[in-house]
């Protein structure tokens, strides 16, 4: 797969919304079914956002594979391509996604509701603007996450070494990735940091977004008061 010129394909990584298998850090607050429903809504939000960006083809990379009925429905109703994630850990799966595309690719997850179409457009422009180096024409763009990871990675061409020996899921991901970029002499740029939804405290900000103000799962959980209590944040006076 690939696009003409510098218009990148957009890959969205998402797990099947199976109760107990997704958003596990939120289960204590939302319950397994509520966490799965929230994950489903976040995935649909991410797909709508990527389509609004008006860049290249949107490809949903499904885990553990593309057989779940949710993914089949999304392919039919959201006009996106559907592929199964392949490989072992997250790094191997991301490397495989980049290897499947001949041209530039922006890869995002499904749990960053703060990520908007404007961020994707800016990332595509930043990636195209980076200069080539004597070592090659490849370059990278990132949007770091507040938790030490990143919510977007873009490459002009596949570079599997970028995803090897990274402590995925830790607060060290972006720092380790920067060191790898320097080792590879790969030019890169970073856009402003965003937040994702991973822990109960993140649900407070999620409920403040207009797109999620009517979210049933947040209301059932009794947010914001319940989230503040469990996250250790003070109540508002």
Image (tube, rainbow, N blue to C red):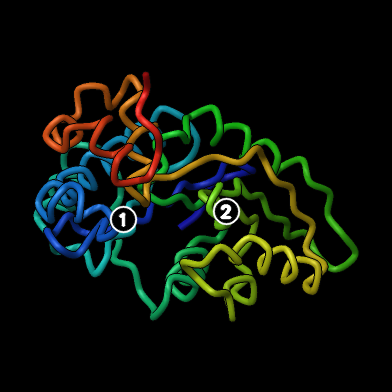
Check the image and report above or below for 180 versus 132: below
Report the residue at 12% width, 58% height from top: 19
Check the image and report above or below for 83 versus 159: above
Of the pair 114 and 58, the residue shown nearer to us: 114
Q: Is residue 105 visible?
A: no
- Extreme-right residue of the structure: 134
Mark 1 vs mark 2, CA separation in Å:
15 Å
Q: Give the quarter of the figure containing the N terminus.
A: bottom left
User: How far across and down, in percent of the image, does residue 98 sit?
Assistant: 52, 64
- Name the secondary structure under disc 1: strand
**Is 115 placed left or right of 110 in the picture?**
right
Mark 2 and mark 1 in contact (Cβ < 8 Å)? no
**Is 40 placed left or right of 231 in the picture?**
left
User: How far across and down, in percent of the image, does residue 181 sit?
Assistant: 74, 66
On the image, which quarter does residue 163 sit in? Answer: bottom right
Within 10 angstroms of label 2, few (less than 14), some, or many (20 or more) residues? some
- Name the secondary structure under disc 2: strand
Of the pair 143 and 105, the residue shown nearer to us: 143
Of the pair 230 and 115, the residue shown nearer to us: 230
Residue on which the image places disc 2: 153
Report the residue at 59% width, 74% height from top: 160
On the image, which quarter does residue 211 sit in? Answer: top left
Residue on which the image places disc 1: 14
Report the residue at 63% width, 43% height from top: 5
Of the pair 134 and 113, the residue shown nearer to us: 113
User: How far across and down, in percent of the image, does residue 147 sit?
Assistant: 53, 53
User: How far across and down, in percent of the image, does residue 198 sit?
Assistant: 37, 51
| Residue 191 - label | none
């Amino acid at each position: 797969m690939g696009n003409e010129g510098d218009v990148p394909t957009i890959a969205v990584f998402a797990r099947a919304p199976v109760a107990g298998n997704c958003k596990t850090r939120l289960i204590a607050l939302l319950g397994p079914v509520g966490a799965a429903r929230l994950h489903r809504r976040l995935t649909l939000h991410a797909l709508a956002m990527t389509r609004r960006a008006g860049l290249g083809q949107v490809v949903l990379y499904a885990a553990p594979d593309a057989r779940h009925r949710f993914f089949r429905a999304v392919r039919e109703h959201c006009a996106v391509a559907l592929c199964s994630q392949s490989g072992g850990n997250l790094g191997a799966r991301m490397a495989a996604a980049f290897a499947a595309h001949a041209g530039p690719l922006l890869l995002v997850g499904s749990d960053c509701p703060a990520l908007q179409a404007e961020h994707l457009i800016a990332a595509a422009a930043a990636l195209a603007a980076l200069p080539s180096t004597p070592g090659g024409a490849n370059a990278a763009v990132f949007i770091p996450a507040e938790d030490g990871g990143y919510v977007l990675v873009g490459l002009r061409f596949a570079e599997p070494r970028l995803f090897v020996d990274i402590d995925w899921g830790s607060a060290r991901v972006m720092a380790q990735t920067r060191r790898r970029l320097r080792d590879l002499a790969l030019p890169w740029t970073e856009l402003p940091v965003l937040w994702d939804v991973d822990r109960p405290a993140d649900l407070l900000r999620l409920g403040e977004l207009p797109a999620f103000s009517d979210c049933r799962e947040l209301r059932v959980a009794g947010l914001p008061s319940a989230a503040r209590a469990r996250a250790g944040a003070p109540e508002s006076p």
